[in-house]
Each structure stands twice: as C-alpha cells, then as structure tokens.
Amino acid sequence: MKHIDVVVIGAGPTGCMLAGELATAGRSVTVLDKRAAPSTLSRAFGVHARTLELLDARGLADRLVATGAAAPGLKLWRGAALNLGRLRTRFPFVLVTPQRNVDALLEEHARDRGADIIRGFTVTGVEQDGDGVRVHGHDSSGRGRTFHATYAVGADGAHSAVRTMIGQPFPGKAVLRSIMLADVELENPPDNLVTVNAVRDGFAFIAPYGDNLFRVIAWNRRHQVDDTAPVDREELRSTIEVAMGTDYGLGDVRWQSRFHSDERQVPQYRTGRVFLAGDAAHVHSPAGGQGMNTGIQDAVNLGWKLAAVLDGADDAVLDTYHSERHPVGRLVLRSSGATMRMMIVRPWILRKIRNGVVAALLGFPPIGDAIARMFSGIGIGYGHHAGESTVVGRRAEDLPTDAGRLYEVMRSGGFVLVTEPGTPAPGDVHAVARTDEGPGLLVRPDGYIAWAGDSASGRWRDALERWTARTSNGARPVSR
C-alpha cells in the first residue's frame, strides 16, 4: 500500500487550496471526492480581500479577479453602506464571482502543483493509530480501496462524513429556513454596490456578476417550505419588490434553489491525526458571504503547518491550527448571525432603530473601517505571546521589497525574512530587504508575522526554529 503524506476528503475550494499548499511544500497529497465531476452550482459568490491576498501570494488572484465584478462596498438598508474602498490592500473590494470559478482555479492549481485528485470515490471509514490514518472507501463501480497517510483532513462540507466518523459533534441550531438563491438578469439593475434591504416580512440581497447577471438571495417570511421545493419566479420577483421597492425589471432566471441556514461549529478542529476544515468545521449565516473565504483561509493556515511537522517540526505546531482558527470561526459565526438577526427583526420600532444606528456607525470612519477590516478578513489576527512585538500574529501588509511586492516574494510557499533597508541578508533563509520604513519581519507562509524587530540581531531564528525545527545554523530547509 502506497503511503501518502496527507489525504484530503473533499475537492471543494477548501480541499483544493489545502492540496495546493501541501504540494507546493513538496508533500504527497491525495484528494478524494464523491462527486464524479466538479459541481456546476455556485452557492458562494463573494471573495473577500484577505482571501484575494492569500491567492495573490500564490500567483492566482489576478486570474480570479478577471472572472468577476469588484464591488467597493455594500449598500445596506435605508442608506447605510459599508465602504471597503479605504482598506489598505491591493484588493479594496469584494469580488463577486460564481464559486465554480474559484473551484476551477484552485483545482487546476492543486493539480499543477502535483496533487492527485480522485473523483467518484466515496469514503466509508477513517481509522487512525500511532502510525497514521487509513481512509477506506469505494469508487463508483463499488470497488473498495484503502489509502494510508500520515494525516487526513475532512474538507467534505456541512454534512461531513469524516466529522461523523471521528466522533466530532456539531453543536448549534438552525437560524432560517427556505432561503431562495438565484442567478438572474435584471433590466434596470442597481448600481455596482452589493445591495441589501430588509423589511418586516423578508429581505433581498443583490450582487453583480458582470454581463448583466446578478446573484440574488431572498427570504419571504410568509412562505416557508422545504429546501427541495422549487423557487417560483413570481415569489422571487415579489420578494425582491417588497424588500427593495422594485423588482429591477427581473428578467431570465438562469438558476435557482433553496437552502436553510444553520449556526454550528465543532468543538475541536483536530482529533489526533485527523483535522476538519471549512464547512466540515463550521457553518453559519450567509450574511457577509464568509463561508468559502473562511474555509480557504483555514486551508492556508493548516497546509504549511502539516508540511512543517512532516519536515520534522514539533507536533505541537499542529495544535495551533485549532487555537488560531477556531476563534476565527466563532467570530464569523457570531458576526454573520448578528447581521442576519438584524435583517429579520420584525417590530417596526426595532427596524427603525436598526436603520438609524447601523447607518450612523458605518458612516463614522473609525467604526466603519474597523467593521470593513473584520468583514474583509484584513483585520483578523492570531495574537502574540508576552515579550513579543505587538505586530506578531498580525497580517503582513504587501510591503515593497528589493525583490518586488512581498506577496510576490511569498509565492515560493515558505517563510520569508524581510530585513530593514541596508541590512545584509543572511544566506541560509529566503530573505529580502524592505524598501520602506519599518522593522525586520519574519513572515509565515500564510502571510502572518511570526517575529518582528532588528533583523541583524538574529533573534528571528528562535521564532523560525519554534515553527519549523530548523536549527539556528540553517540546517533544515523551511520547505521543499
């Protein structure tokens, strides 16, 4: 039986991003997916700034941006608007593009990097011991097969079979039923801002895909049916009209479905040698379009850590996947849930208060910008230990260096030491010099700061060794 470093179950955006990260680090990875072909459906539609930055660090962002429409803000109820244009990033917008474009890009990237993706394979069992993980299953013909790996990752969605097999509960509750999802044409569309409005008996959300195609999410409080019920065009039209005051000249409905919204999160992202990522680990309200983005960011966080431990780093590095990403999942769950609850509040006095308060808060730049950073992922950080610089754990900005933008330099997939201008670069680590003012930085493969200070002191080596077990004389490679 061939041994694989990591088996990933699920070939959606989370699974393929993770596979690409592992393959970039020189690790063998096999992705198993029960679907015979990639899904043509597009539940998700928005790619936020932090996700685009991570894709930029792998040379993928510009290709994805070309497939969609950039919305520099979100127009909310009664004049409230979230401005993303002031974000300090190369991507001060939310990219509206069908999820199938993200799926196709990340699967192609994973394959190009050397990942093995097997479709039409149903996983029926996951077992682990001190030697590794055995993943059992069968192909579409019923022929059984077992994969043996050092680690396994369940990225198989909200109804994760892996989560059940390893005994992880999924506590939480249902929030909304019978939410309509559709891709439509509009004769008289709103402007290019993502537009949301909520009234007593429902809400509607409209986002531009480009070429006069729009994604609509709508909810009618007075018509709650099973997820399998078809979406009637007239119900969709009338719900948009009630929420927005106009149906914007609803034209062709190209695709439609219903879904329900849950708020759930597993207590532990790691169970021995098996990890959960993306919707397998957390699901939440669609408000804010955070799901796919959070999953991709899970994958980038976990990928380099698995590679580092496979290269000899301490196993405790893998525990930081849970300690860093579980709070992020909880934050997204709570913030998106609060947004959804504001949208469906029923008493008129509460809706009036909501409209005024939200508009005032978002219109006050210090608060509005802080919300934009959280919403976009730019403001997410992982904290630091006592005695470390306060910038440790924060996202590294795309600063200029003598070798180009930092996110271009990061495309090798390993740690990057950024020295101060004029400071000699050591020869035993991937190093560049910044061309602006600021301290030396050791930047993790996922774009977060592992150390900051005087690079000439060499103290960055201690941080590098903690994460990678690389000795201070550079004996162990960071990635392969």
Image: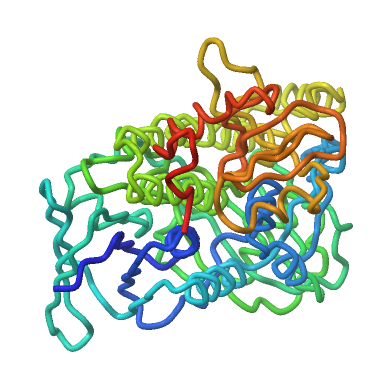
Residue 96 falls left or right of residue 159: right
Q: Which residue is at 64% across, 79% downward?
A: 254
- The percent position of residue 171, horizontal first and vertical second, equals 30, 36
> Residue visible at 69% across and 57% down?
56
* Identity of the residue drawn at 41% across and 29% down: 323
Report the residue at 51% width, 67% height from top.
257
Q: Nearer the viewer, residue 286 or 225?
A: 286
Q: Is residue 131 above or below residue 338?
A: below
- Which quadrant of the structure image shows residue 387? top right
Relative side of 28 to 256, left or right: left
Q: How is the image coloured?
A: rainbow
Figure quadrant of residue 187 = bottom right
- Give the x, y percent position of residue 327: 46, 29
Q: Position of residue 455 (x, y in %)?
A: 68, 28
Q: How many marks?
A: 0
From the viewer's perspective, is residue 8 above or below residue 298?
below
Q: Is residue 71 above or below residue 1?
A: above
Q: Quadrant of residue 460?
A: top right
Task: Tell me if I can see residue 222 in this picture.
Answer: no
**Nearest to the observer: residue 290 or residue 246:** 290
Q: Residue furthest top?
A: 386
Q: Is residue 174 visible?
A: yes
